[in-house]
């Protein structure tokens, strides 16, 4: 239960007490500052508490936005301030000062607003939600109250609430083909008590059924798969809209929403590959290639954003041009569509699945994603080269965590730390690229089982250590994590294809999926300000360089059939360790209460 303390003299005819109760608050009243402080101290420390001026006039949704969002320790709107357990100490200090300064006298002006001013003077961060056209005011006299009440009648707060349930920035397909009706589905679900997590799970189940339909290899199965994939995407939009509509942001929801999109898409790729195999067409290499390309695209997005989100002097002519283009409506939609965001991508996959073959679907997906990756990466490279940004230690640490370096690379990095100081700033991405290219090309050109792949993998280990020997603060150092991902995943793909036995590529698909889950999990921990994956986890699964070396050794020492079994065992082992730790973390009380808004790709 949350507690709201109404401060000041009650106003006849006011609905504020009923509004607060409708939002789940236990309402108490305080006539003066001293009584308000006493009531505040009596509220258990593990509960949310709010101070609300009894003269408050406003929409219920304005109160909901200001007083019930679980993501922020402290939040406020005019006439009301709230604190969760993490913000209680700051609120209590501010209240004590106000009581001391006012001598416990009867309240004349707004105590909530005075408390907010005190919090600001302390430098305490207080969330102030954007209210837009919603009314939230403290009416000091009858005339002001009448004016505020008239303003209330001119704005439909339910319409505002429904509109704000939809993300303000989304892809063309999602904005015009899904959101116009999915918001009403979200409201229907919310009013019947369905939670975002339940809808997220329904979306996953629907996608898995779609993958099973695709795996039948029949035309009817492919048509059903395409329809169900779109239905899964609609539910994927609905879960976030429920969260925004009713402010049901949760720790578990953050984990489910962040990971299920990838699980759904990659399970669907596997279903298409199984369906094609039933028809005599082996497209597992294409399925794995699509997963590798899509994952690397995401890592480019994540790395670039982490490198620059808190950088100082973070401007460039390229960014300025992009900002100007955003002011021209049609260019915004063209640029959003050509990067093939999740809505456009899933729509394309669904239509092609129903109308063509899995091979054609994967060819189109690979071509589209390759173009989008080239476009976005080239733009970000230009921005990085033309801006004069000074990156922080936090950004460098985030990139180091995204690099996923294991014991081998970390040990070499420590040994090379002093020699690396004199190297040029572009050394990290260059050596990461050369080392990765060497191991992938060697594996592709020397065939399965050759010793040269091991030599190239050893070189890759050395270059990986050198790449992270210095803090990743260079202009292009954000390229290091995606280059490592491309090298590791590409090596597994090439060696499995070179094995040329049944089951090798599906086993490789499973291994890359397990490792990619670990990398996504690391990303979302960092984005939630919860730190990276624990060091013991990275060590236990070897780091990117350790896994790459291990796979090349297995290919050299084992027969193709034995290599397939080894890849399968490795995939199961990595998946078990990573999933168990991930589940433990995301369901723990210490994980952040956030809801992922989704990524553009």
Image: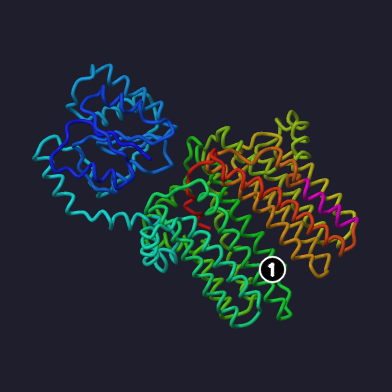
> Is residue 548 shown in magenta?
yes
Q: Residue at x 71, y 48 (%)?
A: 577
The residue lying furthest to the left in this view is 143
Which residue is more in the foreground, 269 or 333?
269
Question: How is the protein colored in the picture?
Answer: rainbow
Q: Which residues are magenta?
A: 546-557
Relative to residue 577, is residue 474 drawn left or right?
left
Residue identifier under label 1 = 286
Which residue is more in the foreground, 70 or 539?
70
Secondary structure character of the magenta stretch overall: helix
| Relative height, residue 555 to residue 117 (above, below) | below
Which x, y percent locates residue 60? 26, 48
Q: Residue at x 87, y 64 (%)?
A: 560
The residue lying furthest to the bottom in this view is 219
Which x, y percent locates residue 456? 83, 50
Dividing the picture into quarters, in which one does residue 537 lie?
Answer: top right
Q: Residue at x 51, y 61 (%)?
A: 341
Dividing the picture into quarters, in which one does residue 295 lie?
Answer: bottom right
Relative to residue 330, is residue 111 drawn left or right?
left
Dividing the picture into quarters, in which one does residue 14 lie?
Answer: top left
How many labels sit on residues? 1
Relative to residue 427, is residue 246 drawn left or right?
left
Which x, y percent locates residue 164? 34, 54
Q: Secondary structure at mark 1?
A: helix
> Is residue 533 shown in magenta?
no
| Number of residues whose C-alpha sits closer than 10 Å to that of mark 1, classed few (under 14), some (14–19) or many (20 or more) | many
The N terminus lies in quadrant: top left
Which residue is more in the foreground, 264 or 27?
27
Which x, y percent locates residue 366? 63, 67
Which residue is more in the foreground, 43 or 225?
43
């Amino acid at each position: 239960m949350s507690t709201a303390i109404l401060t000041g003299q009650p106003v006849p005819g006011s609905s504020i007490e009923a509004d607060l109760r409708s939002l789940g608050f236990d309402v108490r009243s305080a006539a003066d500052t001293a009584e308000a402080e006493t009531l505040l101290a009596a509220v258990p420390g593990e509960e949310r508490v709010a101070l609300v001026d009894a003269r408050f006039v406003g929409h219920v949704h304005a109160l909901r936005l200001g007083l019930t969002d679980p993501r922020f320790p402290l939040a406020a709107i005019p006439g009301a301030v709230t604190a969760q357990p993490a913000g209680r100490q700051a609120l209590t200090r501010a209240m004590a000062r106000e009581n001391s300064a006012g001598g416990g006298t009867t309240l004349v002006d707004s105590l909530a607003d005075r408390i907010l001013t005190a919090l600001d003077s302390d430098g305490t961060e207080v969330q102030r939600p954007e209210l837009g056209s919603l009314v939230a005011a403290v009416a000091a006299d009858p005339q002001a109250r009448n004016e505020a009440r008239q303003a209330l009648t001119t704005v439909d707060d339910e319409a505002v609430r429904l509109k704000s349930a939809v993300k303000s920035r989304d892809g063309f397909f999602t904005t015009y083909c899904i959101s116009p009706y999915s918001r009403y589905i979200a409201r229907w679900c919310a009013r019947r008590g369905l939670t975002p997590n339940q809808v997220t799970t329904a979306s996953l189940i629907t996608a898995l059924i779609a993958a099973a339909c695709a795996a039948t290899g029949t035309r009817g199965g492919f048509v059903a798969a395409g329809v169900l994939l779109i239905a899964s995407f609609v539910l994927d939009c609905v879960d976030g809209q429920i969260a925004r509509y009713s402010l049901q942001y949760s720790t578990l929801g953050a984990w489910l929403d962040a990971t299920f999109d990838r699980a759904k898409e990659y399970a669907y790729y596997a279903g298409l590959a199984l369906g094609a195999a039933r028809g005599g067409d082996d497209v597992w290499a294409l399925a794995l290639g699509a997963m590798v390309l899509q994952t690397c695209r995401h890592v480019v997005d994540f790395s670039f954003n982490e490198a620059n989100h808190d950088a100082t002097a973070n401007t460039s002519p390229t960014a300025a041009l992009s900002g100007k283009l955003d002011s021209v409506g049609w260019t915004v939609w063209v640029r959003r569509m050509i990067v093939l965001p999740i809505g456009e991508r899933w729509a394309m996959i669904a239509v092609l699945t129903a109308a063509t073959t899995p091979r054609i679907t994967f060819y189109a997906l690979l071509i589209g994603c390759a173009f989008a990756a080239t476009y976005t990466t080239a733009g970000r490279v230009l921005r990085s080269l033309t801006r004069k940004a000074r990156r922080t230690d936090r950004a460098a640490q985030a990139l180091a965590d995204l690099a996923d370096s294991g014991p081998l690379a970390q040990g070499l990095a420590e040994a090379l730390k002093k020699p690396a100081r004199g190297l040029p700033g572009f050394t990290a991405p260059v050596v990461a690229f050369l080392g990765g290219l060497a191991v992938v090309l060697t594996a592709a050109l020397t065939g399965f089982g050759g010793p040269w792949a091991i030599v190239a993998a050893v070189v890759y280990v050395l270059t990986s250590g050198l790449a992270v020997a210095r803090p990743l603060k260079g202009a292009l150092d954000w390229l290091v994590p995606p280059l490592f991902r491309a090298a590791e995943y590409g090596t597994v793909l090439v060696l499995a294809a070179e094995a040329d036995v049944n089951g090798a590529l599906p086993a490789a698909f499973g291994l890359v999926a397990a490792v990619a889950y670990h990398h996504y999990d690391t990303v979302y921990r960092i984005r939630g300000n919860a730190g990276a994956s624990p060091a013991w986890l990275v060590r236990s699964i070897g780091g990117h360089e350790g896994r790459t070396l291990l796979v090349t050794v297995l290919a050299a020492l084992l027969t193709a059939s034995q290599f397939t079994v080894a890849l399968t065992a490795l995939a199961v082992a990595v998946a078990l360790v990573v999933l168990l730790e991930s589940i433990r973390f995301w369901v723990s009380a210490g994980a952040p209460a956030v809801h992922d808004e989704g990524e553009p790709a």
